[in-house]
Amino acid sequence: MIEKKFRVESADDLRLDLFLKNKLPGMSRARIQKAIREGQVLVNGRTTRPGQRLKEGDWIELALTESVPEGGLQPEPMDLKIIYEDDQIVVLDKPPGLVVHPGAGVRQGTLVQGLLYRYPEIAAVGSAARPGIVHRLDKDTSGVMVVALTPGAYQSLRQQFEERTIHKTYLGLALGRFKQKKGMIDLPLGRHVHHREKISVRTRKPRVAITHYEVLKEFRETTLLALKPITGRTHQLRVHLSATGHPLAGDARYGGQSRQKTRYPRLFLHAWKLSLQHPVSRLEMEFESSLPPELEKILEAEKPLK
């Protein structure tokens, strides 16, 4: 379920469906219109039609049911690397190239379908379209993830993420050298003004985004960083580093250097550590995922400082 609430700030005589398309760039206009017709969108507490003209001060409430592939999510056998599991949560090491849940153009072979095969009970946990999922990693990012196995664990973990009491640390290899060994990147992010499939600092709808970084090791042309996102925006680490002139090695989308592909065959971004409070015992727990062999190999090939 996607639940949101918006207030119309200016009387620009905009249609409801177009207003929501601007607010929900990842959702098609046809999907939005269907949701409006089905009563999943209220304007000032009432159902309406896609073409309704909005006025300044109107309140729009959404309770959108997320789409599930036709026939439902089908469990699929999958070799999952489990770091920890009990009757409430499972912590796993996600490999690169694995999509977390079905979405645009991807209906099979996702992590969710592998989880459903191993833990069928998660079908009733959280969203029907992404059962058990409380956060995700990009397809090309590897590393540690936590998944909820019960509704109680789901609510607890979601709350911890919202309150920012779950802490994540990534390892990233950035191009170039940093003047400061530690620092903070505070650059609001949103959809790119022209390329809507990208996240950018050039946006009409900026949202607060903060990343802390620490230099772990310097090479002649690159720097190994520990990255700690305070907020959890889409592609935050990749866009923040690119915007500061230090894109991540192997980042085909935000790196802007096609010649990287031979030297860096995959994105050098790895979810290294994750700390959280157990949903039931309330114990503080920390989990760690070692760099995969292909990233270790890249580090070994980097030229050391003289």
Image (tube, rainbow, N blue to C red):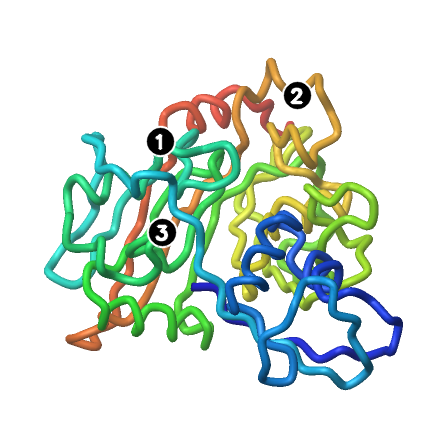
* Amino acid of disc 3: Arg
Callout 1 crowding tier (Cα within 10 Å): few <14, some 14–19, many ≥20: some
Q: Quadrant of residue 258?
A: top right
Mark toward the start of the polypeptide (2 vs 3): 3
Dot label at residue 130: 3
Q: In the rendered view of the protein, which quadrant contains the N terminus? A: bottom left
For the residues labelled 2 and 3, the Cα–Cα distance comes to 33 Å
x, y percent for residue 136: 42, 50
Q: Residue at x 74, y 63 (%)?
A: 51
x, y percent for residue 248: 62, 37
x, y percent for residue 130: 36, 51
Residue at the limit of the structure toward the top, as seen here: 262
* Amino acid of disc 1: Gln
Left or right: 292 as drawn, with respect to 17: left
Left or right: 145 as drawn, with respect to 207: left
Q: Identify the residue under disc 1.
A: 108
Viewer-nearest of discs 1 and 2: 1
Mark toward the start of the polypeptide (1 vs 2): 1
Mark 2 element type: helix
Viewer-nearest of discs 2 and 3: 3
Which residue is more in the foreground, 118 or 70? 70
* Amino acid of disc 2: Gln
Q: Identify the residue under disc 2.
A: 260
Q: On screen, 15 above or below 97?
A: below
